[in-house]
Image: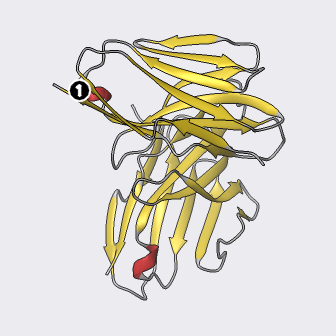
Amino acid sequence: GAVVSQHPSWVICKSGTSVKIECRSLDFQATTMFWYRQFPKQSLMLMATSNEGSKATYEQGVEKDKFLINHASLTLSTLTVTSAHPEDSSFYICSARGRNYAGNTIYFGEGSWLTVV
Amino acid sequence: KNQVEQSPQSLIILEGKNCTLQCNYTVSPFSNLRWYKQDTGRGPVSLTIMTFSENTKSNGRYTATLDADTKQSSLHITASQLSDSASYICVVKKNQAGTALIFGKGTTLSVSS
């Protein structure tokens, strides 16, 4: 079964509104979570890295005020797209890394499709 | 510049046939290399993870190879099935604290009957 759960899987919102995407680690404590966006037929692009209890580190070109990331607990990180516009429509994926990280494993969520109309 | 290049970009094969996907990287310092399978509209699923000292690793019909000297990796799929149709992504992690993963653009595999 999935060890990283994303919700919602699909969301449609009106332009100008905000939408929140949740990423949960189900079977482990995720000390670090990564948020990606993926356009059709493109590879994943890292948006930000968040460590539990601290501010997220954003990649160059990613607006931190537009893409709000919260990692308040060891099992939950949220991405809020504020004042969404049609160009924000994309596939958003999170991944999580556990505390021990012994197996070098990073688990990905199932992704969330965002359509802004 | 840290890059991960995959080839071919896309591939079409008949069910039951074998195929090999290539991945070349220039990431340094190197920590590990991963192959992921991503079905359309889904999150990536890990197939293999290989460190510097590993040359070959298998996961069912998937066999990954790694040549850390030439910085090349391959993913061989044996006896392909229709369900193998997906994007296969090569990902390299730098041996550097705090860094995430460097993704290739993927190879889109289509298996037809």
Q: Nearer the viewer, residue A28 or B57?
A: B57
Q: Residue at x 60, y 40 (%)?
A: B5
Tell me the quarter of the picture where residue B13 sits. Answer: top left
B79 displayed left or right of B106: left
Q: Residue at x 65, y 18 (%)?
A: B66
Q: Is residue B49 above or below residue B45?
A: above
Of A107 and A44, nearer the camera is: A44
Q: Residue at x 69, y 13 (%)?
A: B54
Q: Quadrant of residue B65?
A: top right
Image position, residue B45 (x, y; %): 46, 34
Assess disc 1: are there few (<14), some (14-19) or many (≥20) residues with their C-alpha within 10 Å of its C-alpha: some
Question: Chain for mark 1?
Answer: B
Q: Is residue B7 above or below residue B48?
A: below
Left or right relative to B21: residue A117: left
Q: Secondary structure at mark 1?
A: helix
The relative height of residue A26 versus residue B71 in the rendered view (above or below) is: below
User: Residue B110 placed where, x, y %?
Assistant: 29, 34
Q: Amino acid at mark 1?
A: Leu
- List the residue tagged with mark 1: B82
Pick whichever, B66 or A36, lies toward us.
B66
